[in-house]
Amino acid sequence: MRCPFCRNDDSRVVDSREADEGQAIRRRRSCTACGKRFTTVEEAVLAVVKRSGVTEPFSRDKVVRGVARACQGRPVDPDALALLAHQVEETVRASGTAEVPSHEVGMAILGPLRELDAVAYLRFASVYRNFSCVADFEAEIADLRGRLAAEPEDQGTEHESV
Ligand SMILES: [Zn+2]
């Protein structure tokens, strides 16, 4: 890593710390020639492989943009979208591979989006999972209803255990 001030190619690490909840390492370096300090960030590259075979870096912004389209007109605030993108990244990273098919990114979006907004979820799922007929929507809605119906029961048992 060349010094950005004098282009010397040797530097000494004076401090290392985790950044971004352990997903990156930030190193403070001191140039052995001019003594100036600079910071480097080291991060495992997470690549998304598109259906075309093209690889691109995973981007939380891209997840947010994709989901925001499905959330148009829905009461979903930007913070919730940012959190969702973060959850998606964690899920994708947890898969333990450096190259993830875009399909898996979509799968990772579906779960948290369903929790966030049922209508946005249906919109996203209809495109993403290629809903081709009304029956596909009906099956998905029946599944959503089943989950909603199961919720009060869950809360009940939580209260009991407290
Ligand atoms: Zn230097």
Image: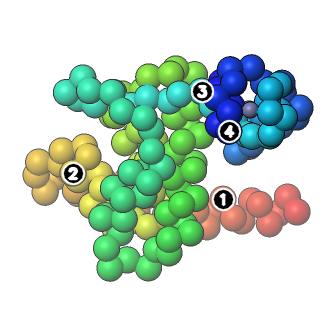
Can residue 41 be seen in this snapshot?
no
Q: Earlier in the sequence, mark 4 or mark 1?
A: 4
Quadrant housing residue 99? top left
Query: Which residue is the site of mark 3?
Result: 44
Instruction: Tell me which amino acid carries mark 4.
Output: Phe
Residue 5 is labelled as 4
Ligand 1 lies under 8 Å from the Cβ of mark 2: no
Residue 143 located left or right of residue 29 = left
- Name the residue: 44% across, 54% down: 61
Ligand 1 lies under 8 Å from the Cβ of mark 1: no
Q: Earlier in the sequence, mark 3 or mark 4?
A: 4
Mark 3–mark 4 CB contact (< 8 Å): no
Residue 62 located left or right of residue 36 = left
Query: Which residue is the site of mark 1?
Result: 154
- Residue 138, image x, y percentages: 23, 57
Ligand 1 lies under 8 Å from the Cβ of mark 4: yes
Q: Secondary structure at mark 3?
A: loop
Q: Earlier in the sequence, mark 2 or mark 4?
A: 4
Spatial separation of the CA atoms under disc 4 and disc 1: 59 Å
Spatial separation of the CA atoms under disc 1 and disc 3: 38 Å
Q: Earlier in the sequence, mark 1 or mark 3?
A: 3
Spatial separation of the CA atoms under disc 2 and disc 4: 50 Å
Ligand 1 lies in quarter? top right
- Residue 12, image x, y percentages: 83, 24
Residue 104 located left or right of residue 132 = right
Residue 127 is labelled as 2
Mark 1–mark 3 CB contact (< 8 Å): no
Instruction: Tell me which amino acid carries mark 1.
Output: Asp
